[in-house]
Image (cartoon, rainbow, N blue to C red):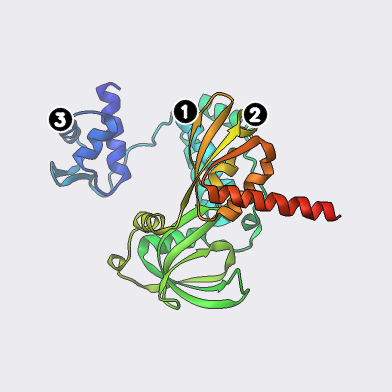
Amino acid sequence: MNRIDRLHAILTHLQSKKKVTAQEMADRFNISLRTVYRDVKALDESGVPVIGEAGSGYTIMEGYRLPPVMFTQEEASALLLGAKLAEQFTDGSVRRHFNAALFKIKAVLRSPDKEYVDSLTEHIEILTRSNPDRESPQQYLSQLQQAVVHKNIVHMQYRSNMKEEVTRRAVEPIGLLHYGSAWHLIGWCRLREDYRDFRLSRMMGVTLDENTFDPGAHPSIQQYIGQIRASSDLQEAIVCVRKDTAKYLVEQKYLNGFVSEEDLGTCLRMKFLTSSFVYFARWLLMYTDAIVVEQPETLKEHIRELSEKLAAHHTAY
């Protein structure tokens, strides 16, 4: 990247955040701190109102904005892919805002790039398994994003998955997670006096309290995930899978705790971490003689027991 392009990129980066440290810019653009200081000085001397100094971070004076940013074809294509994924993995409240932003982005593209993006749009589709959350009339994701950022207390009516009962909850949110094909809100539940995982599709009404809570009283979402992983009772399993079958595991292996694999020639030795050998054994039985359990012995026993039950069941009929 030449210096002119780098100065423009640094200016864009400064406008994208409230405050940017010199080290952050050095890491992003792979330059030395001394070069960062020279570039910031050059921007300041050219009339860009850079506020701050080395050691404390830099920001751009409020109200100063660049002319419309020009995107490359590759950048516009990446944003298009983001829009396609947003259609599948967010709810209507977020998709609406994303599509509005994408129209603004297209507005500043050069004519050839607009034609390129329009053509690419017609040739990309995202296929996923049926996800009942996407048909849910509740559209709370955008609202909950605001609560997480502004530290608003969330009031909701929540339907339990096990008892099918509806309870009123007041929650101090610490973050949002997407797993198991659904969005989940993680927060401190005042009713249960503990951290809870709330699936958005089970929320039957959400309002944000104007009152805020003290974020210092809770871990960050990253810290929470780390604590859960550290305290989870996971057990290791090692399985050899024939190569002609391994390709069919695809996403399923990740859902079942896949960690790593080793190529042994005719098969792959795969390592998993699972919380239940019983359920893990049931999954492995799908692949019959294409898998061999190396360890632990407990998993082998579950496989044998389930196989015997299966044989006895079908022999009886």
- What residue is pinned by disc 1? 74
123 horizontally vs 179: left or right: right
- Quadrant where the C terminus lies? bottom right
Image marks 2 and 3: residues in contact by CB distance under 8 Å: no
- Residue 202 at what x, y percent from top left? 58, 66
Gap between marks 1 and 3, in whole Å? 29 Å
Q: Where residue 203 is drawn, which disc sits there?
A: none
Q: Secondary structure at mark 2?
A: helix
Residue type for callout 2: Asp
Q: Position of residue 30 (x, y in %)?
A: 26, 29
Nearest the viewer among 3 and 28 is: 28
Give the residue drawn at x 47%, y 51%.
235
Q: Which residue has dot 2 on it? A: 244
Height in image: 271 above or below 274? above
- At a point 60% along the width and 68% down the height, the residue shown is 161
Q: Which residue is mark 3?
A: 38
Is 93 left, or right, of 55 in this rendering? right
Task: Give me the C-alpha separation between circle 1 and circle 2.
Answer: 36 Å
Horizontal side of 260 relative to 29 (left or right) equals right
Q: Residue at x 43, y 31 (%)?
A: 71
Choose top left, top right, bottom left or bottom right for residue 45.
Answer: top left
The first of marks 2 and 3 along the sequence is 3
Question: Secondary structure under badge 3?
Answer: helix
Camera-side residue of 251 and 212 = 251
Report the Cα–Cα distance between label 2 and label 3. 57 Å
The residue located at (49%, 37%) in the rendering is 79
